Each structure stands twice: as C-alpha cells, then as structure tokens.
Amino acid sequence: MRVCFEMQLRPERIAEYIARHAAVWPEMLHAIRDAGRRNYSLFLREDGLLIGTYETDDDAAAQRTLAADPRTARWEADMAEFFVAEIGRPDQEAPRLTEVFNLEDQLARTPSGPDRA
C-alpha cells in the first residue's frame, strides 16, 4: 500500500530541517526500514508544507513498531521543534491523505490496445 501524509514545518526552521535530512541518522534509517516502510520520500513546499510518501504492507503495524522503537523516539524528540503541531508526537499524528488517482493502477485495469488521442 502507498501512504501519503502532510505536516507543517515552522517557516523559520525550514533551512535547518533540510540540512538535517541531508544526512538522517543511520539508526533512524534502519528503524524506518525495520518497521516495513520502503520507497519513503519527503517533499517540501516553500511555506513549510511537508508531504511524505512511502509504501508498506501494513501501515498500522509499521506505525506501532515505530511508535514503540526507542530509535524513533530519540529522532522525533530531536525533530519535534521543527513542526507546527496541535497534539502529541508530530510524526505519529500526521494526517494521512487519500489517494484519488494512480497512473499505474488505472493502466493495469485498462485493456491494451492503441492509445486513444
């Protein structure tokens, strides 16, 4: 399954956030991988809107694994000050976005034949 989420960075912290993500702690990279997330990317708009995407076989299980992992807790504590958050741990509470279109999924359901103009 593909997952997409959004978060809001504090505008005054964007440059530092980008710098920290140029070399994420190896232990955090391993925690993400060990939880079953793959093809993980973050996209950032100039105003601090952060969109993340990843693939996983079981998002709820991956979320529970990361929430219980001390490696994740250390990273999230270090990164929390970068986010505008209403409650709790920003990384754990990020709203999920609903996928409404996927090219590969639709192509797979389309009968093969000449392209229509």
Image (cartoon, rainbow, N blue to C red):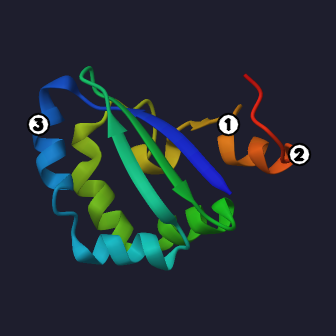
Q: Is residue 23 above or below residue 84?
A: below
State the CA–CA distance, disc 3 to disc 2: 47 Å
Is there any visible trace of residue 69 in the rendered image?
no
Residue at image coords 89%, 45%: 111
Residue 58: x and y, percent? 69, 66
So how many labels did they put on this image? 3
Marks 2 and 1: CB-CB under 8 Å? no
Label whose residue precedes the other's in the sequence (3 or 2): 3
**Circle 1 is placed at which residue position?**
99
Residue at image coords 23%, 28%: 10
Front one among 54 and 8: 54
Residue at image coords 57%, 62%: 63
Q: Callout 2: helix, strand or loop? A: loop
Residue 15 lies left or right of residue 107; in this view the side is left
Label whose residue precedes the other's in the sequence (1 or 3): 3
Residue 31: x and y, percent? 40, 75
**Circle 2 is placed at which residue position?**
111
Amino acid under disc 2: Pro
Which of the 4 quarters of the picture holds residue 110? Answer: top right
